[in-house]
Amino acid sequence: MPAYGAILPALNAARFLTEVVGDIRARQPGLRVLVVDDGSTDGTADVARAAGAEVIVHEVNRGKGEALKTGYAWAQEAGLDWVYTMDSDGQHLPAELQGFQDAAAAGDLDIVIGTRMDATADMPWLRKRTNEFTSWVISRLAGTNIPDSQNGYRLYRVACLEGLTLKTSRYDSESEILVRLARRGFRIGSAPITTVYGDEVSSINPLVDTGRFFRLVLMLLFSRD
């Protein structure tokens, strides 16, 4: 049986983790859950451990990309075959984990990305247009169609991550990894997921992170690896 894990980058997510980790473990009992506490000040690590997750702590905030890199290294060291990435605030439903596995098997895929773009009635107009634009750009750079490139709910074949070097460290890292893996010949597909919005406050800075995205695009245009 393949070994599965899940990486949950977390910044001050203590109030969500008991439910999120508990739901993941209930639906996928053999799945290992890692919470990467990226400089939290609200007891995130303690809550995650109490919920049954493994925990790695960044003493200071390094950014979501660095938290994911910590998780990728953990997945390889743990000998996992597949690893999910999920938000820690409840926006990604553990009930939909199996759909990623089904999509990977049906399409002989190496990476499966959740997509919200088949049902966007409740998605804010600006977010929808931004997702469409950024997904179009990343798809062109990757040479394959990626309908929702900004979606962090994903499933990776861990073997794809071996020897991978990412130059970004924030939200742009989630775009960089898709382009680099596609250019290495790995197969990317999608699985539909539910759009969930709660009362959490986004850590995305529209101005700064948009600048990072366009800087990434320029870097990838002049890099073929």
Image: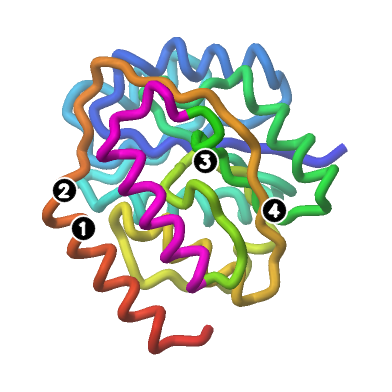
Going from the N terminus, do you reach mark 3 or mark 1 first?
3
Name which of mark 4 and mark 3 comes first in the sequence: 3
Q: Nearer the viewer, mark 4 or mark 2?
A: 2
Residue 92 point in image, percent of width and height: 48, 26
The amino acid sitting under disc 2 is Pro
For the point 45% across and 60% down, which residue is it?
Answer: 136
Whole-number angstrom distance, CA of label 3 to CA of label 1: 22 Å
Tell me the residue that label 3 is attached to. 85
Label 1 sits on a secondary structure element that is: helix
Q: Are marks 3 and 2 in contact (CB under 8 Å)?
A: no
- Disc 1 residue type (three-letter): Thr
Q: In the rendering, which numbered label is found on residue 206?
A: 2
Quick one: 108 or 52, which is closer to the camera?
Answer: 108
Magenta-colored span: 120-141
Q: Residues within 10 Å of mark 2 (few under 14, many from 20)?
A: few
Evaluate if marks 4 and 3 touch, with contact meaning CB atoms under 8 Å apart: no
How far apart are the alpha carbons under marks 2 and 1?
6 Å
Looking at the image, tell me whether mark 3 or mark 2 is earlier in sequence order: 3
- Could you tell me which residue is drawn at 34 percent across and 27 percent down? 45
Q: For the residues labelled 2 and 1, say whether their Cβ atoms are less than 8 Å apart.
A: yes
Tag in front: 3 or 2: 2
First in sequence: mark 4 or mark 1?
Answer: 4
Q: Amino acid at mark 3?
A: Thr
**For mark 1, what is the residue?**
210
Q: Which residue is mark 4?
A: 157
Q: Secondary structure at mark 4?
A: strand
Residue 205 percent location from the top left of the image: 15, 46
> Which residue is located at x 58 percent, y 45 percent?
113
Q: Which mark is residue 115?
A: none
